[in-house]
Amino acid sequence: MRAAWRGSAALTVGVVVLAGCGLLPSSQESSPPAPATPTLTMPAAACGTGDSVTPPDVENLTVNGIPAAAFNTPLVVPYQGLEGGDEQRPSVLRLEITTSSSGSPVTFRATGAQLVETLTGTTPAVGELTVFSEAGPEKCVAVAYAFSTVVGKGAIRAQGLNEEVVTFAVATVREAARDVDLEVSAAKIDAGDPIDAIVQVTDVFGNPVENASVDLMLPEKGPGTFATGANTFTVFTDPKGRASVAINTREGRGTSLSVTAKGDLAACRPFENQYACLPISPFPTSMRRAGRRRSRWSSPSPRSTSPSRPPERRTRPGSPSISRARRSASRRAPRCACCWATRHRE
């Protein structure tokens, strides 16, 4: 449903013909001309004309047509643009308040949200917006639109000579997931020790996404497996957008371990990172999962030892240098390389 509302009200004039009652003039008598019927282009005198300086009295604030006191629908971050969303999960709110006069200034102030005067054009969003009331067929109103990119609580105040307030929750949804980060609990461990893989899923605005599904993968026949013994594992994020899983490492299977994480949503285009899609990009279910982002942890190679010298006992080498590669244009899946030293036995 497009996030645009246009209120309309039809003004009907009823005519009752009373014959033989003496209430209508006879055909011989000339009757005065009937008054012009009001039309939508000729608003009824529902309010007086104000000025551009004096605020009007305000009342009856509504949000998407619902009285402010009864509005309890969460506002969803506009991950599909301001024209996305529906009645159950709106991405934009239409705020309308009745005013005592037309052409008068009404100021909307937002907390935890942003305001625009119209959903078309390139008007920048602001935290405080002053609009001028307009006369309609039944009443004078002032209108503004609100959206939010930050999860939490939001509030809008509509102020004239008095004010009315609406409060609402701001939420994100699983479909808004755009970015996945992956890290490991240690950059260097001893072979045989467990290590945790930790993922963080956020939307395009950086809000944590709950219940997002992330597939974790380890190389086949590599030095690590998940607790199930398999090299794949799926996790679901908590309310903070985080999830973790333990990886068991084994000796004699190499000196590094790579972990790959990938989201489960369709990309906006085939083979493109779902997390690189623009907020207004659609998500057709026919598209295959594709696209990755890479982070890399690396450690220096161990020093070689001379045969004439006994090898040093190195149970846990010093901390390695850790570097993160820049996000590549292809934004490949998060991938961690964890290096460890095999325990030395004398």
Image (cartoon, rainbow, N blue to C red):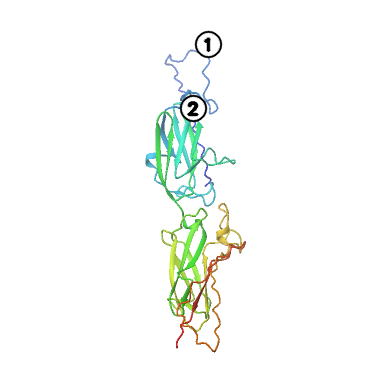
Instruction: Residue type at mark 2: give it.
Output: Ser
Instruction: Residue type at mark 1: give it.
Output: Ser
> Residue 70 sits in which quadrant?
top left
Packing grade of label 1 (10 A; few <14, some 14-19, many >=20) is few
Regarding residue 234, the answer to whether it shows in the image is yes
Q: Is residue 298 above or below residue 346?
A: above
Q: Residue furthest top?
A: 29
Q: Residue 204, percent across and down? A: 52, 54
Looking at the picture, tell me which residue is in the foreground, 193 or 305: 305
Packing grade of label 2 (10 A; few <14, some 14-19, many >=20) is many
Label at residue 104: 2
Label at residue 30: 1
> Under tag 2, what secondary structure?
loop
Q: Is residue 302 above or below residue 41?
A: below
> Under tag 1, what secondary structure?
loop
Disc 2 or 1, which lies upstream in sequence? 1
Q: Residue 136, percent across and down? A: 50, 29
Q: How many marks?
A: 2
Report the mark closest to the observer, 2 or 1: 2
Quarter of the picture holding the C terminus? bottom left
Q: Is residue 173 above or below residue 314?
A: above
Q: Residue at x 40, y 40 (%)?
A: 166
Q: Residue 241, percent across and down? A: 44, 60
What is the CA distance from the residue labelled 2 to the residue labelled 1? Answer: 44 Å
Q: Residue furthest front?
A: 308
Regarding residue 284, the answer to whether it shows in the image is no
